[in-house]
Amino acid sequence: MTPRCVVAPALLLAAVLAAPHVGRAQTFKVARFNIGGDGGTDYLTAEPGTGRVFISRGTHVMVVDGASGKVLGDIPDTPRTHGIALVPASHHGFITNGGDSTVTMFDLASLAVIKRIPVRTGGLDGIMYDDFSDRIILTNHSRPIGTVVALDPKSGDLVGTVELEDNAPEGAASDGKGRIFVNNESKNTIQVIDDKKLAVLASWPLAPCEGPTGIAYDRATDRIFSGCGKRSVVVDPASGKVVTTIANGDGVDALGWDASQRLIYIPAGRDSNVTVVHEDSPDHYSVLATVATMRGAKTITVDPVRHVAYLFQPEYGPPPPGSPPPAPGSRTPPGPVVAAWLFAISH
């Protein structure tokens, strides 16, 4: 399908202020591209400065030009794929495949698959690159307990494993000084990992946060941002305490951070929007806008060079005639993909 860009008047959105005292309203533009392709989705990853966006599609990863929606390439055979991490220094990318508990290692330039790396813990989900330790970090919904697994980004070799307190670890972020912070969605905690020794250092409660998923670390102010349903939190890593909260939508599954712009993007799949927040100071934050997207768009990525945030969500048609009704709580889509929308938010 030829990518189709839509920039409707409704998508040229003025800021919606979250409170009367906020006085820094901004306008955010949204471009929407129908990129086609089959499959559902989980995470997507923007390659800083190049405009390329890597999008998980269930059994393959699409590579798309974020400025035009043009499909640039495809990485096949990634069963139940979840996330993508990019390591420019080693010229490698990595994809988590929950379906067969492997990580696909590929060449960043050609997109050719280099090898499949078995990860015995299972439950592969989140993935990130830690520049301090020069390691790929996996956060896995392993059973009976979640794990963090570290890989070497040059060879793909497994370096070590850490057992967590929760079987539903979500996002991870690095302070660039030797610590990794992992959100535990079921226990509503952050665990602190020594990324050289691969050992747990601490566990911090995140109340009033419920279901922490997305996470980012501001290295300039030493603050952790944890994306939570309806109310996200800011944590001081010196004390492990929540210093303030941010109101946002429901259905959060990731969090975007543009460090030079000091902007946090919190997507809400159930409420079909993104809350855009400005960090005024380490403990004070202003909601600038609530940007409309579409139902289900719950993960996000930010190109910190081009200052564009991207979301992706397939649009499903009705089920074929005679199809059985979905089981209660099933995540199976109602019907085939009829459109696949990439959203690009800029200001």
Image (tube, rainbow, N blue to C red):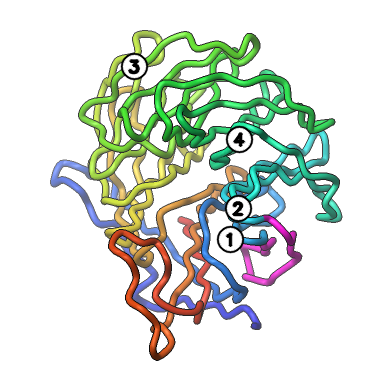
| Residue 252 place in picture, x, y as percent | 35, 47
Q: Amino acid at mark 4?
A: Met
Between marks 2 and 3, how big is the CA–CA gap? 30 Å
Q: Amino acid at mark 3?
A: Trp
The one nearer the camera, 144 or 200, is 144
Displayed quadrant of residue 126: top right
Residue shown at 39% from the left, 61% from the top: 331
| Residue 326 place in picture, x, y as percent | 34, 70
Which residue is identified by label 4?
128
Contact? badges 1 and 4 (CB < 8 Å): no
Between marks 4 and 2, how big is the CA–CA gap? 14 Å
Which residue is identified by label 2?
81
| Residue 171 place in picture, x, y as percent | 48, 35
Q: Secondary structure at mark 1?
A: loop
Between marks 1 and 4, how big is the CA–CA gap? 19 Å
Q: Is residue 72 magenta?
A: yes
The magenta-colored residue range is 62-78
Please report whichever mark, 1 or 2, sits nearer to the chain's N-terminal start: 1
Contact? badges 2 and 3 (CB < 8 Å): no
Which residue is identified by label 1?
58
Between marks 4 and 3, how big is the CA–CA gap? 21 Å
Please report whichever mark, 1 or 3, sits nearer to the chain's N-terminal start: 1
Categorize mark 3 by other alpha carbons within 10 Å: few (<14), some (14-19), many (20+).
some
Between marks 1 and 2, how big is the CA–CA gap? 5 Å
* Residue 75 located left or right of residue 121: right
Q: Which mark is residue 204?
A: 3
Mark 4 or 2, closer to the camera:
2
Residue shown at 64% from the left, 70% from the top: 68
Mark 1 or 3, closer to the camera:
1
